[in-house]
Image (cartoon, rainbow, N blue to C red):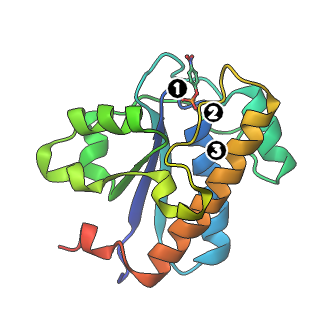
Amino acid sequence: MGSAVVKILFVCLGNICRSPTAEGVFRAMAARELPELALTVDSAGTAGYHAGEAPDSRTCEAALRRGYDLSGLRARAVEPYDFEVFDLILAMDRQNLETLKRRAPAQRRGRLRLLLEFAPQCGLFEVPDPYYGGANGFEQVLDLIEAASLGLCTALRRGTLAPLWAP
Ligand code: 4NP
């Protein structure tokens, strides 16, 4: 891995529920699991209609109950520059992954993945959108994202993703 900073972007639709949760959970988990690794962690939405807003209050409350403070995060839309900057862009669902693939330059598409690739034991490919659902949806989002964040830490520790950003 060397001393280079690894830059990871989490992406959902609105950047107020799933991807800010992933940003907060992964940042906390990586600080604990991979303290030696220099990371830049961010999140964004494929849609910008919540840009500038704090995460959804239900998202913040559920995350805080597990010790993750998301209150300082603010939503933003994915920008073309993100495809140049980030080493790995992890989408919460297939629809957002397809949107990213359409927008990304062809030579950067290999850096786009589904987050739940890192939690195959969960048996799901997508983090379900909790926005219009009940409270349990926010707990499921956290369960899935915690599992995938741990899997992502393991992949980073083992260096299995390094070919993606090798010079
Ligand atoms: P997110 O959830 O993509 O996980 O942030 C959503 C937030 C807002 C909307 C949809 C999904 N919305 O339609 O406003």
Going by the numbered disc 2, the residue's amino acid type is Cys
**Looking at the image, which residue is at 86% across and 47% down?**
65
Residue 35: x %, y % from top left: 60, 77
Q: How many residues crowd around disc 1 within 10 Å: few (fewer than 14), some, or many (20 or more)?
A: many
Identify the mark at residue 14; answer none if there is no mark: 1
The residue to which callout 3 is attached is: 21
Q: Is mark 2 within 8 Å of ligand 1?
A: yes
In the rendered image, which residue does mark 2 sit on? 17
Quarter of image, ligand 1: top right
Q: Secondary structure at mark 1?
A: loop
Is 33 on the left or on the right of 92, as rendered? right
Q: Residue furthest right?
A: 65
Kind of residue at disc 3 = Thr
Q: Is residue 25 above or below residue 99?
A: below
Q: Earlier in the sequence, mark 1 or mark 3?
A: 1
Of residues 166 and 54, the one nearer the viewer is 166
Query: How far apart in space, not on screen, are marks 1 and 2 (Cα)?
Result: 7 Å
